[in-house]
Image: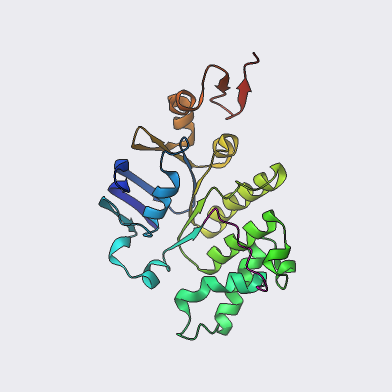
């Protein structure tokens, strides 16, 4: 399965991304990078079909996302937003079960196959032991794994995550990134996540997408690192970026 962004322009009143072209293949982990306000979250919403494109099209395989209804689209692309899920009196298994909604009947009743998909998703992300715990009573790191399990239960070839490590401490940040890497390889998923964690992106991602001056640039990670584009975008007089590791060095005043 492939994800194709074909001459897309994305934004609201004005384009944040103009005439972007990218193709991502299954089994690839991709980081979406850019300065604040560049349009990373907006682009994710456009790719997911949650916002209409200004021009161009997004295709999963041969299917154009924006020509589908919501139920069809939800079988191809799942989204994990940056918002925390803290619904009271809802267990982790119940939240993950919501990912099966594109496949259930009008009553939303889970079949035996649906329940098996929920159990498998919980196991894949290592939180089977939290199955019956309420999501408003678990940690941020555990909650984020619940939301990824929900996306896995949805069984889509493409998973989009908007800053999934934003609220996590350092160990959980790296654990989550390693989980995403493992899922791309074990499940042949296309996973794209927006992030400011350049070291994670540099070490784990197969490709990097960069929004710069309304242009969408996608390159294999090593090529992007050697291009100087990220170093130029994120460095300043007091901040120097190591182009090989993504580590930041501060110039003391």
Measured as percent of width and height from the top left, residue 223 is found at: 44, 31
Instruction: Please identify the residue farthest to the front as the structure is shown.
Output: 13
Instruction: Please identify the residue farthest to the left as the structure is shown.
Output: 55
Q: Residue at x 50, y 27 (%)?
A: 234
Left or right? Give the position of 34 relative to 10.
right
Measured as percent of width and height from the top left, residue 48 is found at: 40, 58
Q: Residue at x 58, y 60 (%)?
A: 148
Q: Residue at x 55, y 84 (%)?
A: 111
- Colouring of the image: rainbow
Left or right? Give the position of 158 relative to 242.
left
Quadrant (top left/top right/bottom left/bottom right) for the C terminus: top right
Residue 83 vs 232, above or below: the answer is below
Tally of numbered discs: 0
| Rendering quarter of residue 158 | bottom left
Q: Is residue 83 magenta?
A: yes
Residue 229 in view: yes
Residue 63 in view: no
User: In the depicted view, which residue is nearer to us: 219 or 249?
Assistant: 249
Chief SS of the magenta region: loop
Magenta residue span: 81-90
Measured as percent of width and height from the top left, residue 24 is found at: 40, 49
């Amino acid at each position: 399965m492939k994800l194709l962004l074909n001459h897309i322009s994305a934004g609201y009143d004005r384009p944040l991304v103009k005439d972007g072209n990218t193709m991502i293949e299954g089994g690839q982990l991709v980081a979406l990078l850019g300065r604040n306000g560049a349009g990373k979250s907006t682009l994710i919403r456009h790719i997911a079909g949650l916002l209409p494109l200004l021009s161009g099209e997004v295709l999963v395989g041969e299917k154009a996302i924006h020509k589908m209804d919501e139920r069809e689209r939800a079988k191809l692309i799942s989204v994990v937003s940056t918002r925390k899920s803290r619904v009271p009196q809802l267990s982790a298994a119940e939240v993950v079960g919501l990912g099966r909604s594109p496949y259930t009947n009008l009553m939303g009743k889970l079949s035996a196959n649906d329940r098996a998909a929920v159990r498998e998703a919980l196991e894949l992300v290592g939180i089977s032991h939290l199955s019956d715990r309420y999501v408003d009573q678990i940690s941020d790191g555990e909650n984020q794994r619940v939301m990824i399990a929900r996306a896995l239960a949805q069984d889509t070839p493409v998973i989009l995550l908007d800053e999934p490590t934003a609220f996590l401490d350092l160990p959980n940040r790296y654990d989550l990134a390693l989980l995403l890497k493992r899922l791309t390889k074990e499940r042949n998923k296309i996973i794209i996540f927006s992030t400011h964690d350049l070291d994670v992106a540099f070490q784990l991602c197969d490709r990097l997408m960069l929004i710069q001056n309304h242009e969408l640039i996608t390159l294999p990670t090593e090529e992007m690192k050697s291009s100087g584009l990220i170093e130029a975008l994120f460095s300043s007089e007091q901040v120097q970026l190591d182009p090989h590791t993504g580590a930041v060095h501060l110039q003391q005043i």
